[in-house]
Amino acid sequence: VLGYSLDLLRQTISKKKAHERLNEDLVNELKEAFNLFDSQQIGEIDARELKAVMRAFGIEVNKGDILSIMNSIGKNINENMNFNEFLTVMAPRLVSNFIDFREIEEVEKKSLKYLNYSMKKIQGKFHSKH
């Protein structure tokens, strides 16, 4: 049953891109944080600001991680990123921490239905033997 539940959860999550799974509140929170750490108020943050905002969200990163992140969006360590790039970077990291509880509830409901069905089937076989 647990394996079935995990498979359903993986299927539900893998059908959507990470940034599409972020709920509106989390996107707003990210936008607010981005603007707060955008020290020059130009709609972009640099690598130092990225590191600070990631730490504010509880994501520990070092200089090598930041370099890798910047490279993953086609930037070097001296370039800035805009909010869309920031969202692309943050979404996969936050989705693993903030899976939409509606998705979990859906998997739980399906798992319970499957468990109930299995139990009835087992009970039916048990009662038919006695």
Image (tube, rainbow, N blue to C red):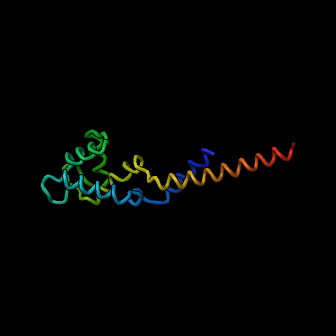
- Can residue 79 be seen from the camera position used here? no
x and y percentages locating residue 125 in the rendered image: 81, 47
Tell me the residue at 52%/57% (across/down).
Answer: 12
User: Is 96 situated left or right of 47 in this image?
Assistant: right
Q: Quadrant of residue 85?
A: bottom left
Tell me the residue at 25%/40% (across/down).
Answer: 63
x and y percentages locating residue 81 in the rendered image: 23, 56
Tell me the residue at 42%/47% (across/down).
Answer: 96
- Can residue 41 be seen from the camera position used here? yes
x and y percentages locating residue 105 in the rendered image: 52, 53
User: Is 72 situated left or right of 51 in this image?
Assistant: right
Residue reaching furthest to the right: 130
Q: Quadrant of residue 82?
A: bottom left
The quadrant of the rendering that contains the N terminus is top right
The quadrant of the rendering that contains the C terminus is top right
Q: Quadrant of residue 67?
A: top left
Q: Nearer the viewer, residue 52 or 104?
A: 104
